[in-house]
Image: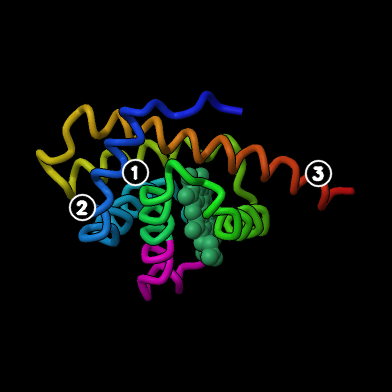
Amino acid sequence: MAAPLSEQTIAIVKATAPALQQHGVAITTRMYDRLFQNEAVKAMFDQAAQDSGEQPRRLAGAILAYAQNVDKLQNLDAPVRRMVERHCDTGVKAEHYPLVAEALLPAIRDVLGEAATDEVLAAWGEAYWFLADILIGKEAEEYELRAA
Ligand code: HEM
């Protein structure tokens, strides 16, 4: 289990929730533009859900819910379960998580501009990996269950 997030990181992530609410879809659309430069990763996604904007909306919703609940993650049990299911349906592995981090953090900078200070990006980087580690752990368990 990852070390708990610091008070400072929790405060910054919660403080940026309104900006994410306003710009969430712009951020995730930009994130996918960056991520899909990798053709193998692009092929994992249902392209119709991208083109309709459905998947960027789902991811923006997940990120916003996370920002709002970062200090009470038990509220996210059901959505996390759904992410684990979808990720295991589509073959998401631990090694993919750095690719999403490398697409998401610059996308936050691209869209929020100077509001995304180094401090904000560092807090989001830490928060991303905290959630990613939870998903990676649960997905490993789910793959084992499915293989059994
Ligand atoms: C902390 C990181 C991540 C979060 C918060 C996240 C969140 C989500 C959410 C909310 C969904 C939609 C679930 C639903 O159907 O309701 C989803 C689906 C999906 N995610 Fe992730 N995800 C993360 C990391 C990744 C990574 C590393 C990959 C691999 C490249 C990935 C690939 C996918 C795919 C392929 C789908 C299914 C999309 C489709 O139906 O086309 N995700 N994710």
**Residue type at the position of mark 2:** Ala
Q: Is mark 3 on a helix, strand or loop?
A: helix
Residue 116 on the magenta span: no
Residue at the extreme right of the image, as rendered? 148
**Residue type at the position of mark 3:** Glu
**Residue type at the position of mark 1:** Leu
Residue at the extreme left of the image, as rendered? 114
Residue 52 on the magenta span: yes
Decide which of 131, 39 is in the foreground and name it: 131
Q: Which numbered disc flags the more N-terminal residue, 2 or 3? A: 2
**Disc 1 versus disc 2: nearer the observer:** 2
Which residue is tagged 3? 144
Kindly identify the residue that appears in the image at 47 percent across and 55 percent down: 42
Which circle marks residue 104 in the picture?
1
**Secondary structure, magenta segment, majority class:** helix
Q: Do the residues labelled 1 and 2 touch (CB within 8 Å)?
A: no
**Disc 2 versus disc 3: nearer the observer:** 2
Segment tinted magenta in the rendering: 43-58
Q: How far apart are marks 3 and 1 (CA)?
A: 28 Å
Kindly identify the residue that appears in the image at 51 percent across and 46 percent down: 73
Q: Distance between the residues labelled 2 and 3?
A: 38 Å
Which residue is tagged 2? 19
